[in-house]
Image: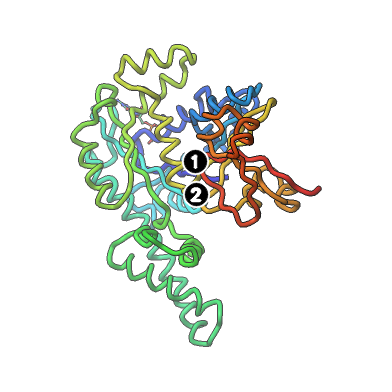
Amino acid sequence: GFKCGIVGLPNVGKSTLFNALTRTAAAQAANYPFCTIEPNTGEVAVPDPRLRKIAAVAKSKEIIPTRISFVDIAGLVRGASKGEGLGNQFLANIREVDAIVHVLRCFEDDDITHVEGRIDPVADAETVETELMLADLESLDRRIVQIRKRAQGKDKEATAALPMMEKALALLQEGKPTRVLLNGIDPEDLKALQGLNLLTSHPVLYVCNVAEADAATGNAHTEAVEKMATAQGARTVVISAAIEAEVAQLPDDEEHEFLAAMGLEEPGLDRLIRAGYELLHLITYFTAGPKETRAWTIEKGTKAPQAAGVIHSDFERGFIRAQTIAYDDFVTLGGEVAAKEAGKARDEGKEYVVQDGDVLLFKFNT
Ligand code: GDP
């Protein structure tokens, strides 16, 4: 599955947020219970209002959302790249994630110690980023010596790997994260970059953790973070971990009223989960029938057979075609039969690139 790693300095609200995420009703959906894969990893349902609409039209008994994982990565302190604190464990954990959710403390509270003794989320972000860059720099410095030697000896693999390594190293030496390479990168270079397994090449989302009173409006700290994020081409979500922790424990029917009283339309966690999903370049297709309406996760650009393979490897192996109905057609026309009659059910083959919201029915050989 796809994983977002939650990072940040100590005492910024990571665990509060992680616990809220994994305690929500959605995370504990009856037929797909929240499961702790490891102590600090939790799967959460991706909220998607389209599910309900499709299920109503298809008269499905059940709704099954798709899911992504969040990992609470503790132990980042100044000096982590040198093995301070839980440094090495931290670095190992963070290498395993696909994207980074970076929590920044944007709340004042004299009772909660700040490790640096002041509230300054932009400076905190730089502290964390610096540790990640130092760790990358060190690991690349070490590896590139070998690769350069092998490339000189005409080793094909090394020769192919070297250009991206040099590019990444040059950036880090300038004090820039390798993430900047992601912008407009072609698929081959992306593979090469991912192959380097660097900490700073993960896409990042900043989460501003604010006091309850600032949840709807943000504050001067969140504005500063937004400015920084915009300059980096990153996104920001403003959340009050304290509110989310409370909401996560409320019964569904009280949630809306509670949030409305805070000036909020939906749980911040829903926004966070969706932003994480987008950060990972993930999209959703649906299957719908009387038994269930279900959402499935694929990466943007996935072709029909591989999309089918997410359900079952037999579907991919024996793939013949995919009956495809766009979400809007499915819902406005009133389901599969009506969409077929209106000529809106397409038969797509092996080369079809599945689109977000497609309602699919696979035909396959067993
Ligand atoms: P972590 O070290 O980043 O995982 O931080 P925790 O989630 O353990 O939070 C550290 C402390 O800050 C705990 O006592 C939390 O209750 C408190 N805390 C977390 N979020 C907020 C918040 O939004 N407002 C206030 N006032 N305290 C918070």
Q: Quadrant of residue 243?
A: top left
Seen from this angle, which residue lies furthest bottom? 153
Q: Callout 2 environment at 10 Å: few (<14), some (14 to 19), or many (20+)?
A: some
Q: Quick one: 141 or 87, which is closer to the camera? A: 141
Query: Three-letter amino acid code at disc 1?
Result: Val
Is residue 157 shown above or below 203?
A: below
Which residue is found at the position 60% from the left and 39% from the top? 343
Q: Nearer the viewer, residue 78 or 40?
A: 40
Pointer 2: what residue? 97
Position in image of residue 188 (x %, y %): 49, 67
Report whether 313 appears left or right of 193: right
Q: Secondary structure at mark 1?
A: strand
Residue, far right: 366
Q: Is residue 324 left or right of residue 115?
A: right
Question: Quick one: quadrant of the N terminus?
Answer: top right
Residue depicted at x 53% and y 26% = 53
With respect to residue 129, does 244 lie above or below? above
Q: Quadrant of residue 337?
A: top right
Does 155 sit left or right of 86 as displayed? right
The amino acid marked with disc number 2 is: Val
Which quadrant of the frame does ligand 1 lie within? top left
Q: Vertical placement of 74 versus 149: above or below?
A: above
The residue at which mark 1 appears reads as 71
Residue 126 seen from this side: yes
Q: Are discs 1 and 2 less than 8 Å apart at CB? A: yes
Q: Could you tell me how far apart the alpha carbons at marks 1 and 2 are, in whole angstroms?
A: 8 Å
Q: Residue at x 50, y 63 (%)?
A: 191
